[in-house]
Image (cartoon, rainbow, N blue to C red):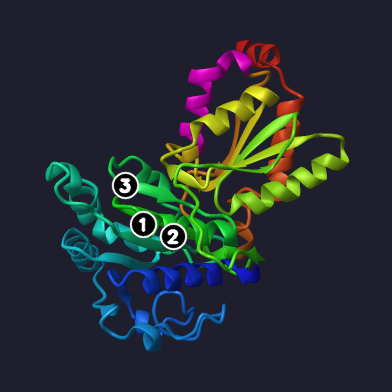
Amino acid sequence: MSVMTYLGAIGAAQREAMEADERVIIMGEDVEANVYGTTGGGKSRSSEGDFLQMFGKKRIRNTPISEEGIVGAAAGAAMTGLRPIVDLSYSSFLYMAMDQFVNQVAKNRYMFGGQASMPVVFRSAMFYGLNTGAHHSDRPYPMFMNVPGLKIIAPASPSDAKGLLRAAIDSDDPVLTFEAVLLWGLKEEVDDNEYRIPLGKARTVREGTDVTIVAISGSVPEAILAAQDLEDEGVSVEIIDPRTLVPLDTRAILESTAKTGRLVIAEPAHRTCGAAAEISALVAEEIFDALRAPIVRVTAPDMQIPFSPSLEKQMYPTRATIGDAVRRVLDSAPQRLAAEISR
């Protein structure tokens, strides 16, 4: 075991994959000189070494600044035998390649009747909470959850970042990974050996009996802090981190919610049509009778991200807002809600 940052764990996963399989390449804008060292060149903050020196320009491919061209080239490379890892930098940049993502990357395995696979990983970073303005702060994973054919991961810890990325690289289907930049510096002990976390397997971060919190991406550390506060108040909180959003580990979410009877969902994306909305619908459809209180979502509001630090700070789930949501759930009952609606 070694102490690694989230970013360093990504670097370790990529290095292992490239050493194990010469078909694995890294491509993207300016990856030869990437300052983080996880997508090609530079000195890695995890001391993984200089990727460019280790693997050469044949496997570390700088690309033009054209997201549509990058994604299209990666799709072609994947269909003809390579296993690309593509760095698209800001997740907001994925929009420029929507045609390639939706009509080529997601559909081609189906359109070719399974005769061609699409083993490609697209990395993108969600720079929300860092005052980068509306054009650079999006958390667009819910939009891609609506595209059949794509797998989607959102690791919330260094160990998960390494294990999920290795599994993604091994997959013959396209995988989009969304990294919360606020987690990049998070440190923990990570297994130095190769390991993989199966896609579609949630993690029980913390066991509890009174209420379930399903927390996504950067909301996981905030949920942990909220649970610690609530423990001091005598409240036992269970935290589920889906880790993979497509496929979603529905069993883990349903079993936990059925056990506690109460559900709070925390995610940094917008409220409408988000992952929290999908999970709410799932629970309501499958185990409505097990609920002892209404489901509560803690999300970003449906508005553009302000540049102002003081305003943006209020946008996303926090220790305080998650804790308040749990208290509301514990203090509510379906009968009281029905009475309020009737008024």
Image point (13%, 43%), residue name: 111
Task: Report if the CB atoms under discs 3 and 1 are less than 8 Å apart.
Answer: no
Image point (36%, 84%), residue name: 32
Quadrant for the C terminus in the image: top right
Image point (52%, 54%), residue name: 155
The residue singled out by tag 3 in the image is: 150
At label 3, the amino acid type is Leu
Task: Report if the CB atoms under discs 3 and 2 are less than 8 Å apart.
Answer: no
SS for dot 3:
loop
In this picture, is 204 found above or below 42?
Answer: above
In this picture, is 161 found above or below 338?
Answer: below
- Looking at the image, tell me whether mark 3 or mark 2 is earlier in sequence order: 3
55 vs 295, left or right, is: left
The residue singled out by tag 1 in the image is: 170
At label 1, the amino acid type is Asp
Task: Report if the CB atoms under discs 2 and 1 are less than 8 Å apart.
Answer: yes
**Residue in the foreground of this view, choosing between 290 and 134:** 290
Quadrant for the N terminus in the image: bottom right
At label 2, the amino acid type is Arg
Label 3, label 1: how many angstroms apart (C-alpha)? 14 Å
Q: Is residue 306 visible?
A: no
Start-end of magenta stretch: 276-290
Q: What is the crowding at mark 2: few (fewer than 14 residues within 10 Å), some, or many (at least 20)?
A: many
Figure quadrant of residue 24: bottom left
SS for dot 2:
helix
Figure quadrant of residue 272: top left
134 vs 318, left or right, is: left
In this picture, is 169 found above or below 232?
Answer: below
